[in-house]
Structures are given as structure tokens and as C-alpha cells.
Amino acid sequence: MTAWRPALLLLFGLAWAAVSSACSLQIPPHQEVARVARFVAHQCDWASMATISTHKPVVGQPFSNVFSVSDGPRGSSTGVPYLYLTDMEVSVQDLQVNPQASLTMSLAQTDYCKQQGFDPQSPLCAHIILSGSVIQVNGTEADFAKKALFSRHPEMMEWPKDHDWFFAKFNISQVWVLDYFGGIKTVSPEEYFQAAPRRKQN
């Protein structure tokens, strides 16, 4: 029996490695709040954006809608959520009256929380809420937004040309993070943009 022990330990180690690699997302420590926020923003491909409705019968009430987002091509995080919008979209019409909005992204959108056994509402299933406004981008920033979005949402390239699509960004004024027990935490835009979603390897 003793002779089999090394082989059993090796098999156990390989199995554990397989489980660990299956959960490929390695979230930053919850104490590093700004890094967690940047990590979530880069991992998520879509967000729920709440605007103040301008449409009857819910004028003046919060109105939440789903949008594809990207803060950069995979592995090239900027922290800035970019969007591909058209004036035909109901929430964009709200933004034309009041550009203030909030944007929510959660690791429940990835495989991470399911693999860890975390309910989407659990604090351990990290999510962020961004407060700010949506503004159109042009020039070189629009070129980057196009690369960021089309690399992660290639279907966008086939969307109807007659919809007058334009690139925009979510201009962040405040970051809210819930990734652990003890209540929601806030991060300033300065702290958020200074943080790196992943530690640089030496």
C-alpha cells in the first residue's frame, strides 16, 4: 500500500491542478479594492446601465437596460467602459436628455461564481457599480473604442450601417465595490485608474 502512496498523491495533485485551471479567473485579494474593481470591469463583456427615463409612462423613473461593453481587448485593460450606441436605442434617448447613469457589472456574468458555488447576490460574487455619465468619443479614442469593442463583440461589425452607430465611453465619477462581507466599499476614480487588474510579473 505504501508503494502506491506517491502515485496516489501525484494523481490527487493533478486532479487539483485541473480543478484550479478550470477556474481560470484569479480575482485579486478583497483588501485591494481598486484592483478588484478593475479586474471585474475587464472580465465582463456586458453591463446593466440605469438611466433616468424620458419615456411615458415611467418618465423620471430609473430604467435599466443591457449593453455590451469593453474596457480594452483581452489583456489590455484601460478601466474605461466603452459602448457602441445608436440614437434609435431607448436608453440612449434618455442619455440625450440626462447623460448621468450608473453601470453595473458582476463576475456572475463569467463562470467564476458558478464554479465557486457563489450565488449572484452573494458578496463573494464580486460586482461593481459605476456612477458617472456617458459621452461620445471621437478621433483616436474612437479608434481605440472600436478595437476594444469589436475584438470582444465581433458581431457588432455586422450590425445595420443605417443605424448611425457611434462610440461612447462611461465617464466614471465614483466606483462602488461589493466583493466580500462587511458592506459595500467606495473607490475614487483616481484610485481606480491607478490600479492594475493583474499584478505585473517580475
Image (cartoon, helix red, strand yellow):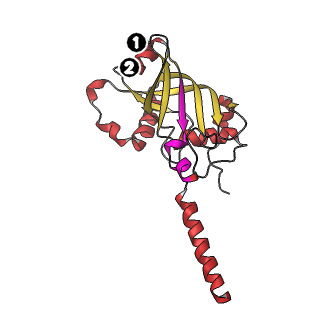
Residue carrying label 2: 90
Q: Residue at x 44, y 16 (%)?
A: 94
Query: Tag 1, which secondary structure?
Result: loop
Residue contact at pointers 1 and 2, CB within 8 angstroms: yes
Q: Residues within 10 Å of mark 2 (few under 14, many from 20)?
A: some
Residue 104 lies in the magenta-colored region? yes
Give the answer, above or below, for where 202 lies relative to 190.
below
User: Which label was assigned to residue 105?
Assistant: none
Question: Which x, y percent locates residue 28?
Answer: 66, 47
Q: Residue at x 43, y 38 (%)?
A: 149
Quarter placement of the C terminus: bottom right
Q: Which residues are magenta?
A: 102-115
Q: Residue at x 32, y 24 (%)?
A: 164
Q: Amino acid at mark 2?
A: Val
4 or 196: nearer the viewer: 4
Residue 172 lies in the magenta-colored region? no
Quarter placement of the N terminus: bottom right
Question: Which x, y percent locates residue 144?
Answer: 46, 36
194 or 127: nearer the viewer: 127
Question: Spatial distance from mark 1 to mark 2, Cα to Cα?
Answer: 8 Å
Residue carrying label 1: 55
Give the answer, above or below, for where 197 lies relative to 104.
below
